[in-house]
Image: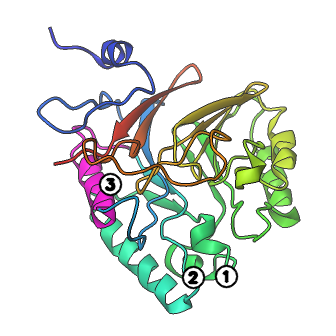
Amino acid sequence: MPLDRRQFLKLAGIGGAVLVSGCARPTATPYAADSDEFFFVQLSDTHWGFRGAPNPEAENTLPKAIAAVNALATPPDFVVFTGDLTHTTDDPKERRRRLAQFKDMVSQLKVKDVRFMPGEHDGSLDRSEAFQEFFGATHFAFDHKGVHFVALDNVSDPAARIGEEQLAWLKRDLDAQPADARIVVLTHRPLFPLYPQWDWATGDGERALELLMPRRNVTVFYGHIHQEHHFKTAHIEHHAAKSLIFPLPAPGSQPRRAPLAWDPANPYRGLGFRQVEAEKPVEYKITELPVVKA
């Protein structure tokens, strides 16, 4: 008897690595058009333009991820890239060239609702000027099937702050939502001080959390740390996504924040993206999907 979606997730384990190649492929069950339930895909830290160790196939991981998303039996409602679309460069022309290449590549996604956020590699050197030329606003909000999404920019400020203007915008946005609103926050850096020594924090992230804390239904999805990580600030859950270029070590597990070495026997280990199923009552089922060798 074929497994339904909940049976599959129970067997696979939420947050576990699941192959997306081959004949069997996990995916969300199609939801009715009038249902409040849906799923989306989060990709992060593609670092397009990176070359060399520890990823000898840096030019292949993003195309493979795009192909994997396109191969999902049920297309997601939307796709979101949570920053570091490109790898940093001091040359403004090269920055724009990489952003243009990235934009052209992701246009191959079959899902047409694709949203983009900057990472510090995209925006900290020019306060996201080039990013905005290609992708528009660095912070924004939108609603989808009963969930209010808020994308915060904690990278355009070189000091890794959200800033007074954006915090005021966040307060106004939250004040306009009903008390029981389901809120999903998208950021690049973590809002909580995960490991400030490695730049794994937001300078004024606690102020954003103070604004969010009165809300009972808040979940944060972010990138930046190149690994799966789960944390709770009181009732607020924070979930970090894997990278599509190279994994980084667990916070504080070694003296320096150096990328983990490439394993020829297990190429793409530690790389991947995720699908998030939003269900009622307030619940988010996360399935980690790896980039796999063809």
Decide if residue 258 is in sight here. yes
Disc 1 target residue: 126
Residue range corresponding to the magenta coloring: 57-76
11 shown above or below 30: above
Q: Quadrant of residue 120?
A: bottom right
User: Looking at the image, which residue sits at the far top?
Assistant: 1
Crowding near pointer 3: few (<14 within 10 Å), some, many (20+)?
some
| Residue at 69 percent of width and 47 percent of height | 190
- Dominant SS type (magenta): helix
Disc 2 target residue: 130
- The amino acid type, in three-letter code, at marker 2 is Ala
160 shown above or below 269: below
Disc 3 target residue: 111
| Residue at 66 percent of width and 53 percent of height | 189
Q: Which mark is residue 163?
A: none
Q: Is residue 2 magenta?
A: no
188 shown above or below 210: below
Q: Earlier in the sequence, mark 1 or mark 3?
A: 3
The x, y position of residue 73, in whole percent, is 21, 38
Alpha carbon separation for disc pair 1 and 3: 30 Å
Kind of element beneath mark 1: loop
| Residue at 85 percent of width and 54 percent of height | 204
The x, y position of residue 231, in whole percent, is 67, 30
